[in-house]
Image: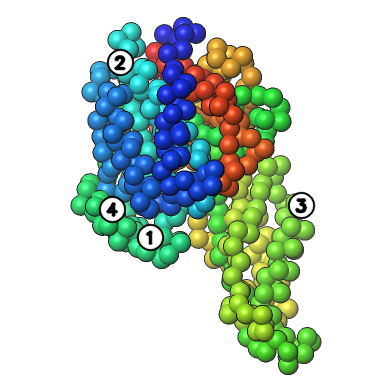
Amino acid sequence: MADNVSRVDGTRVLADLHALRAIGTYKSGVHKPTFSEPHLRSLEWLVQRLPEAGLAGDIDGIGNVLGASTKPGPKLLAGSHLESQNHAGWLDGPLGVVYALEAARVINPDPKIDGAVEVAAWCDEEGHFGHFLGSRSYVGAVAEADIDSARDRNDGRTMREALASAGLADRPRVQAERGRHIGYLEAHIEQGETLESSGLKIGIVTSIVGIWQYRITFTGEQNHAGTTRMAIRRDAGLALARFCVAIDDRFPASCGPRTVWTTGRITLEPGAPSIIPGAAEMLFQIRDDDPAVIARLEDLLRAMAAEVDKQGRCSVAVERIRTGAPARMDASFQQAIEAASAAFAGGKSLRMPSGAGHDAQILATIMPAGMLFVPSIGGISHHWTENTADADIVTGAEVFVDACRRLLVR
Ligand code: GLV
Ligand code: MN
Ligand code: MN
């Protein structure tokens, strides 16, 4: 029963996070792309910790780690991910895995609690090979053909090659046993500045955004940068740049209050100072927790592309390459986190949507799910300077473990 007595060992939580930070260190963060040697070593690290929490498990055939308990009673699934974006932060992912491990270490041996926490590290949340491949495999949403076609966005290596060289090619992929878990709880750094700027300690996630991604390709005419008069150029790079600015001008009239959009990568062909680009490509992402808003923006994007096409200088193709449904977090999970925050964080909590994608939105398709956030210093994430104060990490662990207890004993 939640009793305001935390048996969380804050020193152990911090030591575990630092042990993971020491694997694949990059400046003050880490560089652990999916299936890189430091990522695999981090997964092994977790496998070796599982028995301390009364769990048994291994890395499965898609790179997920799942620690299962034989303790009778209800089971709560908890976790996050251990790979990182390239040259990125030390807490995006590992925080949620270490909290889950700590919850299992505190709760599973406790004979007064009927039930157990099971721990997961989902592979490739950061999308080096696809999007949410690990958690989607667990819920049964990844076909063998999806694995056949997945490639590392960094170097083009196929996922089959990566799995084979990691020694995972012949392992089965573990899939959810329907009805086994009362739900899934994930902790994460906020990755924004809402909590810090409001002096709050815990974010209670209400919903997670849907992410839609596009490849937008401009085709013009490659030519000499010195001899081609400005009036007759068909510069695909310029058309792309104008399009980016037009998006920023026109989206605000059609978007929702929290819609965000990003052009994360631009490629010019052939990409040389003395050549007018004949082709240009942008990877463009829209995020919102209302699919109707995203659909409306996609219509606008296509209409804008048609306008550019009609002008005749360059042609434009818009290809949707990713859709992800937004997810609502379960009301009873939100209540459990709120009660735990009242007990262990002085009630300094806020209900808030998540602008980042998380594995919890995939788990939410098959079971009740909840998420809690801890503050990010300066709101920085997906960068190696990402950080959270030690005291906030420990408070978050206490709230997380107490929320797990409340969910198991209700
Ligand atoms: C996950 O890291 C995201 O990009 O939201
Ligand atoms: Mn993450
Ligand atoms: Mn991330």
Q: Is residue 81 visible?
A: no
Instruction: Residue 338: give its label.
Output: none
SS class of the residue under badge 4? loop
The first of marks 4 and 3 along the sequence is: 4
The first of marks 2 and 4 along the sequence is: 2
SS class of the residue under badge 1? loop
The residue tagged 2 is 109
User: Label 4 vs label 3: CA separation?
Assistant: 48 Å
User: Label 3 vs label 1: CA separation?
Assistant: 36 Å
Image location of residue 241, percent across then percent down: 71, 68
Q: Residue furthest bottom?
A: 227
Residue ID at (46%, 39%): 21
Above or below, 238 against 202 in this view is below
Dot 2 alpha-carbon crowd within 10 angstroms: few under 14, some 14 to 19, many 20 or more: some
* Colour setup of the view: rainbow
User: Label 2 vs label 1: CA separation?
Assistant: 40 Å
The first of marks 3 and 2 along the sequence is: 2
Q: Nearer the viewer, mark 4 or mark 3?
A: 4
